[in-house]
Structure formats: C-alpha cells, structure tokens
Amino acid sequence: MKIAVLPGDGIGPEIVAQAVKVLNALNIGIEMKEAAIGGAGYESAGDPLPAETLKLAKESDAVLLGAVGDWKYDTLPREMRPERGLLRIRKELNLFANLRPALLYPELASASTLKPEVVAGLDIMIVRELTGDIYFGQPRGISTLPNGEREGVNTMRYSESEIRRIGHVAFNIAMKRNKKVCSVDKANVLETTELWRQVMIEISKEYPEVELSHMYVDNAAMQLIRAPKQFDVMVTGNIFGDILSDEASMLTGSIGMLPSASLDANNKGMYEPSHGSAPDIANQDIANPLATILSAAMMLRYSFNDEENATRIESAVKKALAQGYRTADIYTDGTRKVRCSYMGDAVVAAL
Ligand code: NAD
C-alpha cells in the first residue's frame, strides 16, 4: 500500500503527523511518502500543486491530506492560491464521489446544538457528486444584455453516466451499512434532477436488498434538523450535497471530528478532514487530530478494503474519548484536556 502524505498548511502538518503515527502503529506494511501542497507547495516550488506532488499522488494507491490555506496567501493571483492546489488535485485524480459521514459519538452528544435525543446515535453517510452539476456546467458567466443590464448564468447539467456512477457508489456503500438510500433532488422543478431520479430508480433494480427513497432538497434540509436519524445513506448532486453535508456535519457539533473521502471510479481516493487549515491555532499543538485519524480509517476501508483495521482505528478513537481525553475544541467540564500530539498517542495506546 503506497500512500502519498500531503500535510499542507496551518494545522495540517500537526494533525497529519498523528494519523501517520496511527497508521504506523498498525504495522501492516504501509509505505508513506510526503510532498508539499497548498501554501507549502507555493513556498517550496512556486506552485500550490508542484509537479512532483502530482506525480507522487498519481503513483500512489491513496492520498492522505491535511488542509491547505492561510490568510497570508489571500493576495496572491488566483492560480497561485493554496485552494487551487486542492481543486486541481481533485480534478487530476478524477475524484467524483465525495463521502462525508456525520457520526455522533455518544461521549460528545452535548457538543451538538440539537437536543441529545434527536442526535444520539446519529450515523449518516452523505454521498455527494463532486465533478459535475451547476458548478461546472456551460454556459456560465456574467454578461451585459442589449439593454445594458447585467445577467449572470450558470447551467445545471448531468449526463446519465455521471448520475449512474455516483448512484452505484451510494448503493454499494448502503450494502455495507443499513441498506437504505435516500436520493435528494428537486425533480418537481428541475429537469436535470428529474433525470437524476429516473436513473436512481433504474440503478436500484440492481440492488434489490437496498430500500430507495426520494426527497426534495428543501424537505431534506428540514428533515436533517427535525429527525436526522431517519437517514442512512443520502446521495445527491454537487450543489445540494455541498449544502446538506455542511448542515449534517454540524449536527455533530464539532468540525474537528469529521473525516471525508473523495473517490475515483477505481476506489483510489483522497482522504482529508472536513475542516480547513485553522491558521488561528497552527503550531500550538492544540488542534484536534481525530478527523484526520478517522480519514485514515476511511482510507483503509474504501481504498484498501481493510474493514478490520478501519474498525480498529475507529474503536481506538472511541476508546480515547471514553477515557475522557479531549482536545480544546471538544473539551467540557469533567473531561481531560490534552494536546494534539497527546491525543495521537492516546489513540495509538488504545489500538
Ligand atoms: P477552518 O475550518 O480552518 O477553521 C474554522 C474554525 O474551526 C477555526 O476557529 C479553527 O480554529 C477551528 N478548527 C478547524 N479545524 C480544527 C481542528 N482540527 N481542531 C480544532 N479546531 C479546529 O476554516 P476557516 O477559518 O474558514 O479557513 C481557514 C483556512 O483554511 C482558509 O485559508 C481556508 O481557505 C482554508 N480551508 C481549507 C480547506 C481544505 O483544505 N479542505 C477547507 C476549508 C477551509
């Protein structure tokens, strides 16, 4: 197993170091090589995605990423900004399926802004299409009409094959979970998503064990707050998924806990925490490394089909939380506040 390790900027190097520690502790022959991305790429090679980094990522079986970005790069030309490195690597690796679990650990129930009985036991997987939809459709742009008024245009577009491949990802994941897929669309108003619904129904025939339901996106946004535990796997397009996955992540109350995976057609993937580079707390050894450690667990599950070791990591995280260890962002009275590196050690000890 060859992994490209891209720590990136801000807290990236601190949190990735903990995930690397955990992967090494498993002792399962993972080969890891590090390269620069984001601001670190710009500093070392004048490019937020240096050619060497892209080459390493392409040659590897999976990519483990920290985060990119720092306010000090905000004045650079757009192409040189750290975030461009991230967008480019996603595109270069054809990562069309974004998986974002929203899982609430019982020990952290009080961190959610929702009542504990609404969120306790929450375990949702949001599958978002990442390379199509209104974010990429043509034509697009801002132009001036003959009457001098300006007009903005974006195009919502999905081909059948794009819908089909993300549908299969969702159904396959549901087969490993509670066998329920809720497809989110706006088929009453948007033809693009009317096609989306038709294709999902067609695909579902190949997965007779999985129960498929449909929900309009406005209702889905409401149901996620009203009764989130009704969902198992949710599958949706790029723009709806962008919004719903952020909404779902905050049901758990703590951004430092949420991993993510972005996969290509062969399950090669890039794994990263859902949060950013948190420059406000960088270099202080106080960031929460658990989202990154849990991203490493997702990597074992989805890219290496190693359910056993993925579960081992997740159980070790649960154990460290049950033992009362908390980084500052999830600390509450009666628990033990620890540093980033200490939390990494606690997970290794729990393994
Ligand atoms: P952010 O997610 O970095 O931080 C938001 C808040 O959450 C901050 O107060 C931060 O301290 C806290 N936080 C985030 N992760 C944490 C962790 N692991 N442990 C403890 N606290 C944590 O978002 P932002 O402040 O809006 O953006 C900062 C930089 O990150 C920007 O340059 C932005 O472009 C970049 N960014 C990168 C990614 C990515 O690499 N995928 C995603 C979002 C933002």
Image (tube, rainbow, N blue to C red):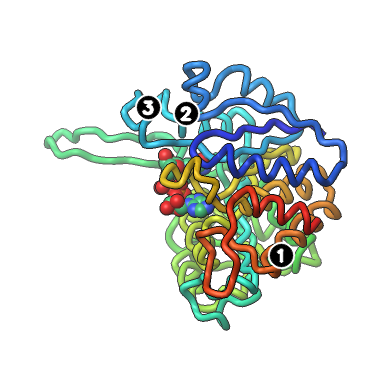
Quarter of the image where one finds residue 63: top right
User: Residue at label 2?
Assistant: 39
Q: Of the residues shown, which amino acid type is indicated by label 3?
A: Arg
Q: In this view, does 124 lie to the left or right of 111?
A: right
User: Residue at label 1?
Assistant: 318
Q: Is residue 325 visible?
A: yes
Q: Position of residue 17 (x, y in %)?
A: 65, 40
Q: Does the residue labelled 2 lie within 8 Å of ligand 1?
A: no
- Tell me the mark number nearer the camera, choosing from 3 and 1: 1
Q: Considering depth in this image, is 66 or 123 the residue closer to the camera?
A: 66
Question: Relative to residue 48, is residue 100 depicted above or below?
Answer: below
In terms of sequence position, does the residue under pointer 2 or pointer 1 come before the other? Answer: 2
- Tell me the mark number nearer the camera, choosing from 3 and 2: 2
What's the CA distance linking mark 3 and mark 1? 40 Å
User: Residue at label 3?
Assistant: 78
Q: Of the residues shown, which amino acid type is indicated by label 2?
A: Gly
Query: Which quadrant: the N terminus?
Result: top right
Q: Which residue lies furthest to the left in this view?
A: 147
